Image (cartoon, grey):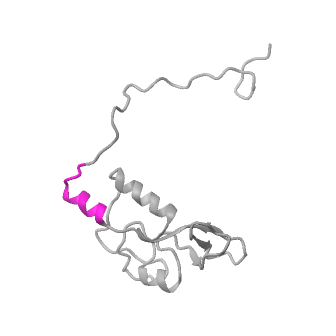
């Protein structure tokens, strides 16, 4: 019989560690009546792709979202006018450059092959025809 090693497919799997000491009995719920939570939940997610939108919504749900206290610097025009949290370019540059504000990726008109009404996103540095299809939410 071959020795039981990590790479041997015939070896039995060992449990790593032990069972958790405490099991969650209910899902996390932040204080729904706090003013900070109200402000965070009311902030809109505009100008981001679906992936970024989902990330931001997850942060809001589990109280990981940190709103900006001061405007951030735009990565395209270098002015301090990025007001939305988790965005890297300002709304003016996102509109004029046709880019997604949270990722700095270019967006073009939706193609016939793209379902769900998404937009085609192209990297800033790539000039080739290989573009990934990413759904885009105008206002959610």
Q: Residue furthest top?
A: 1
Q: Vertically, is 47 above or below 93?
A: above
What residue is rendered at 57% in x and 76% in y? Answer: 107
Observer-nearest residue: 91 or 135?
A: 135
Q: Main secondary structure of the magenta part?
A: helix
Residue 95 at x, y percent in the picture: 47, 83
What residue is rendered at 72% in x and 19% in y? Answer: 4
Q: Residue furthest right?
A: 1
Residue 65 at x, y percent in the picture: 35, 58
Residue 12 at x, y percent in the picture: 68, 20
Q: Vertically, is 58 above or below 76?
A: above
What residue is rendered at 40% in x and 58% in y? Answer: 57
The quadrant the C terminus occupies is bottom left
Q: How many marks?
A: 0
Q: Which residues are magenta?
A: 31-42
Q: Is residue 35 magenta?
A: yes
Q: Is residue 125 magenta?
A: no
Name the image quarter holding residue 11. Answer: top right
The quadrant the N terminus occupies is top right
User: Image check: 53 left or right of 43?
Assistant: right
Residue 130 at x, y percent in the picture: 71, 71
């Amino acid at each position: 019989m071959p020795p039981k090693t990590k790479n041997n497919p015939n070896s039995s799997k060992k449990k790593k560690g032990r069972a958790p000491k405490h099991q969650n009995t209910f899902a996390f719920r932040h204080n729904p009546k706090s003013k900070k939570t109200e402000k965070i939940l009311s902030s809109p997610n505009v100008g981001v792709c679906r992936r970024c939108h989902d990330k931001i919504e997850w942060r809001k749900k589990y109280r990981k979202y940190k709103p900006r206290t001061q405007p951030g610097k735009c990565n395209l025009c270098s002015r301090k006018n990025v007001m939305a949290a988790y965005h890297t370019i300002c709304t003016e540059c996102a509109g004029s450059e046709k880019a997604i504000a949270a990722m700095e990726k270019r967006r073009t008109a939706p193609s016939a092959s793209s379902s769900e009404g998404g937009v085609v996103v192209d990297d800033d540095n790539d000039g080739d025809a290989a573009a990934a299809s990413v759904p885009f939410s105008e206002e959610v």
